[in-house]
Image (cartoon, rainbow, N blue to C red):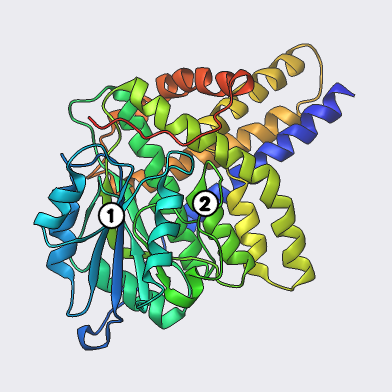
Amino acid sequence: MFTFTLVLVSVIVLIPILTFSLQCFLSLIPASKSEFEKSKLPRLAVLIPAHNEEAIISGILQDVKSQMQDNDRAIVIADNCEDATAEVAKSYGAEVFERFDQTDRGKAYALRFALEKLEADPPEVVIVVDADCRISADALAHLSSKAAKLDRPVQGSYIFGEQTDGVASNNASSFTLWFKNHIRPLGSLRAGMPCQLTGSGMAFPWHVIRKVDVANKSLAEDTTLGLELAYAGYPPTFCPEARIDGHVPKEWGTLVQQRRRWEQGYLESILTNAPKMALRSFTSFRPGLLWAAFDLCIPPVALLGIAWGFLTLCALLMAVFGGSLVPAIMLSVGALLMGSSLVLGWMVHCRDRVPAKAILAMPWFLFRKIAIYVSLLFKREKVWLRTERD
């Protein structure tokens, strides 16, 4: 009975490992870059949700304003701000929507507030970027043209570079986020399949974003938004040409605060949505939903690594005491696939942005994250909390 249970659990863990590896290997396939024509770009509204961001919002506003065309709008949603965020935004020529609501707080509610105000004069495409990011040249053009052409949501490459003055485990976090936000979505694009929304650098045709309520009350609101749009027939697609640069917090405590909330929401989303999406794919004959279900089932790399390590230890102990070798063999194959995917993905896509020491720091990173997952068993997040800025 124990052998059967261990084999079954090993299969459950191998499914996301196989999906992860397939996406990584597909990302290695070269493809031509998409182009756009400036004369045919849609009219934009760039929404920048902000809560007490006076110290850093100037960077993203400079990037956005330098890429805007005539009749485009840069809009900062100053959400429950207690500082000079609104004044700084206005000094850079942005429109400001100020919102004060201590009950419904956070990015999702700020976006719903802005979309309702835009109803009187809607743009053709809405782009959402976070206040603490920077965007690459022509990112807005790539995102908006692709969203308008395909008539579906588009997610840019939201990537994280090296923390030169941060701890080694923070670089390991940057490393895993490269796979979550760039390499895996790129593999999905190569397969002609949808990707997840990752939070910043999201573009939506106006009529598409108005088909759902963006304030979905999920702790992983951007992921949930992408799933709801996929259900509605508008699955997001990836745009690697549009790069959005974020940063991992330097302090481990701040990183824990940021990841804890999102990972709880993401794990809840797996349990809630993955079976439903798989079933919907068969009843509606939509293979993209099945791909999205398997994609959603991939937990954070740290949790996947921890689960694999624990199961491997159990399998080896069972083999030593005369039990079946099948679970150990299965998990060894999974380790080979996962390891080769991580190394190849790093070599091809991000070794110039993430140092090799990030890979070497993975064991310590996994060990430190055990505390996060244990804490989720006893203390669950319920409300939005702003991540402290460095």
Q: Quadrant of residue 239?
A: bottom left
For residue 236, above or below residue 21: below
Residue located 61% across and 73% down the image: 233
| Furthest-bottom residue in this view | 39
Q: Report, in whole angstroms, how far the alpha carbon at label 2 lies from the one at label 1.
A: 17 Å
Determine whether, in the image, residue 41 is placed left or right of residue 340.
left
Taking the image as shown, residue 231 lies to the left or right of residue 53, namely right
What residue is shown with label 1?
A: 244
Pick the front one: 366 or 199: 199
User: What residue sits right under mark 2 in the picture?
Assistant: 223
Quadrant location, the N terminus: top right
Sequence-wise, which precedes: disc 2 or disc 1?
A: 2
Q: Report which quarter residue 38 is drawn in.
A: bottom left
Name the secondary structure under disc 2. helix
Helix, strand or loop at disc 1?
strand
For the residue marked with disc 1, what is the amino acid? Answer: Ile
**Residue 158 in the image, given as x and y percentages of width and height:** 34, 52
Q: Is residue 223 above or below residue 82?
A: below
Q: Vertical placement of 272 versus 230: above or below?
A: above
Give the image location of residue 102, x and y in percent: 43, 38
Pointer 2 local density, CA inside 10 Å: few below 14, some 14–19, many at least 20: many
- In the picture, measured across the screen, residue 293 lies left or right of residue 249, that is right
Residue 188: % across, % down = 50, 62
Q: Locate residue 182, reporting x and y percent.
A: 39, 53
Residue 27 makes an appearance in the image = no
* Left or right of residue 326: residue 160: left
Observer-nearest of 43 and 28: 43
